[in-house]
Amino acid sequence: MKYLDEFRDPSFVKPLLKKIEEVSRKDPARIMEVCGTHTMAISRGGIRPLLSGMVTLISGPGCPVCVTPDGFIDAAIELGMNEKVMIATFGDMIKVPGRGSSLEMEKARGLDLRTVYSPIDALKIAEENPGKEVVFLGVGFETTAPSVGGAIIMAEEKGIANFSVLSSMRTVPEAMEALVLDPEVMIEGFLCPAHVSTIIGADAYLPIVERHGIPCVVAGFEYLDIFLGINMLMRQLKEGKAKVENEYKRVARSGGNLKAQGVIEKVFEKGDALWRGIGVIPSSGLTIRKGYEKFDAERRFGISVSLEMEDTACRCGDVLKGKILPPECPLFGESCTPSAPFGPCMVSSEGACAAYYKYGGA
Ligand code: SF4
Ligand code: SF4
């Protein structure tokens, strides 16, 4: 298939389902869709019931908003309490609950909060407001890291001294590996994220395949991409193979985007990171390198983001480990809805709980 329309053609679905059926076992294979955009597409397309009995799809930690720990929100609020500070963030962060409040609630109490579409927008705000310290909340995976790194490089080049980043950037393969090592999750195959893979490349999953024998298939976000990716995974399982395959070759390359990787490498270094609901995952965070420390909000303002796990009734951690489905959380649809979210999985438009709330168990 060459054109996008073909990936949306429903007449391809039946033959693909037949192929999946041919390579499926008696018990359903446990496949994790790592990315929140896949989770949303699967729910929107009603894909789960079509695969019933053949595949159990587990929603993974691929939504950066959902895995951002409450300590990060608390640190952002703490920074925002400083009258000189203006917080700039992507819109989906403002409702995420911290331990006692959210950015939205604090905005109502006077916190200076701006919603931006990119880190460059935040940099522009800093340029236009020299009397303010603009702190951008850097939340995202490898897809977002190049633009955050690029803004830091630009701030350095332009001498913009009132801009900094509170970094909660994360890397996906390390989280996948942590989940493989969790005996309760029992993943047999990964449907790997499309956008992240365009940056890191399909080869980034080779260590997972080589160390753990778990098949990995990079797949796009159209419905047929998802069926094709699942078929590739199921075929590998049937043949007892484990390799990296790339269904999304039209965009993602084996080696990824070297220029973007170069920006990440230049500005960030690996560090341990706390993933909400999962715990601390070694080397899964991107912290700002010493050479750029003046743009690191933690160092600049002498604060630190807590690495302690929250004690909460939200069961997002169990959702993203595939231990429960969102409706099994006692708060689902009761004290936790998209308009009044209790946990992060209900906040983000790509959260598994939000997807279930919107589309049911489809
Ligand atoms: S329904 Fe709400 S409280 Fe329950 S796991 Fe999902 S986000 Fe957390
Ligand atoms: S919100 Fe949902 S999709 Fe996002 S990490 Fe949590 S469980 Fe996964």
Image (cartoon, rainbow, N blue to C red):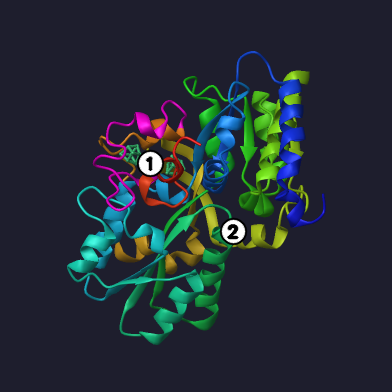
Q: Which mark is residue 276?
A: 1
Q: Which residues are magenta?
A: 321-345
**Ligand 2 under 8 Å from disc 1 Cβ:** yes
Q: Is residue 238 left or right of residue 182?
A: right
Q: Does residue 81 appear anywhere in the picture? A: no
The 10 Å Cα crowd at callout 1, few under 14, some 14 to 19, many 20 or more, is many
Q: Which mark is residue 264?
A: 2
Q: Residue furthest top?
A: 26
Q: Is residue 132 left or right of residue 157?
A: left
Q: Does residue 318 appear anywhere in the picture? A: yes
Instruction: Say which residue appears at 63% left-offset and 37% top-offset.
Output: 191
Whether the magenta-drawn stretch holds residue 184 is answered as no
Total labels drawn? 2
Residue 134 horizontal/vertical position (percent): 36, 74
> Which residue type does callout 2 highlight?
Ile
Residue 250 vs residue 16, the one in the foreground? 16
